[in-house]
């Protein structure tokens, strides 16, 4: 690391790389684009479902967990695909495990939103 790559410059470079990653995921990953679309509905809906700031954080945080997990899943798939196109048991396992992580994060969303919606409508 160069001395000039510390402090504010490092922060700016890291932010630029992160934004580049988000643009790349949006451009190349269908699931991520779909999740961004769902975000346009869920994020405003969270303000209506939640009655207090902690509930808003839990609702929005559970959805952000899905998006974060999807980004990590996509990154793992990119690395595995970079290694080679031929089928390998470990490559398949890595992709399956990262896909399972996305699925579990969706379960967290379903339970979180389901409980808070139930509390709002059922009491």
Image: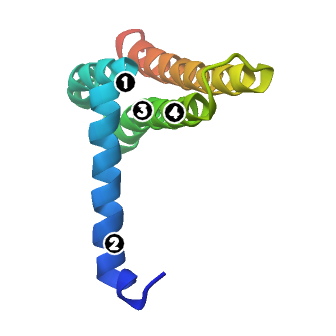
Callout 1: SS:
loop
Of circles 1 and 3, which is in front?
1
Q: Position of residue 50 (x, y in %)?
A: 32, 30
Dot 1 corresponds to which residue?
29
Q: Residues within 10 Å of mark 2 (few under 14, many from 20)?
A: few
Q: Position of residue 6 (x, y in %)?
A: 39, 83
Q: Pointer 4: what residue?
A: 78
The first of marks 3 and 2 along the sequence is: 2
Splitting the image into 4 quarters, where does residue 102 fall? top right
Res. 67 mark? 3
Q: Which mark is nearer the camera, 4 or 2?
A: 4
Q: Position of residue 71 (x, y in %)?
A: 45, 35
* Residue assigned mark 2: 11
- Say whether marks 4 and 3 touch (CB < 8 Å): no
Residues 114 and 69: in front is 69
Label 2 sits on a secondary structure element that is helix
Q: Quadrant of residue 90?
A: top right
Real-space Cα distance between discs 4 and 2? 25 Å
- Compute the Cα span from label 2 to label 1: 26 Å
Secondary structure at numbered mark 3? helix
Q: Few, some or many C-alpha atoms within 10 Å of disc 1 (few <14, some 14-19, many ≥20)? A: some
Which badge, 4 or 2, comes first in the chain's sequence?
A: 2
């Amino acid at each position: 690391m160069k001395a000039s790559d510390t402090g504010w410059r490092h922060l700016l470079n890291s932010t630029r790389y992160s934004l580049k990653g988000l643009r790349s995921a949006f451009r190349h990953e269908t699931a991520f684009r779909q999740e961004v679309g769902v975000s346009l509905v869920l994020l405003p809906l969270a303000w209506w479902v939640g009655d207090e700031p902690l509930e808003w954080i839990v609702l929005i945080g559970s959805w952000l967990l899905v998006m974060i997990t999807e980004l990590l899943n996509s990154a793992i798939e990119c690395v595995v695909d970079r290694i080679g196109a031929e089928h390998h048991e470990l490559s398949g396992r890595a992709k399956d495990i990262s896909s399972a992580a996305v699925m579990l994060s969706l379960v967290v969303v379903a339970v979180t939103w389901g409980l808070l919606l139930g509390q709002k409508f059922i009491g």
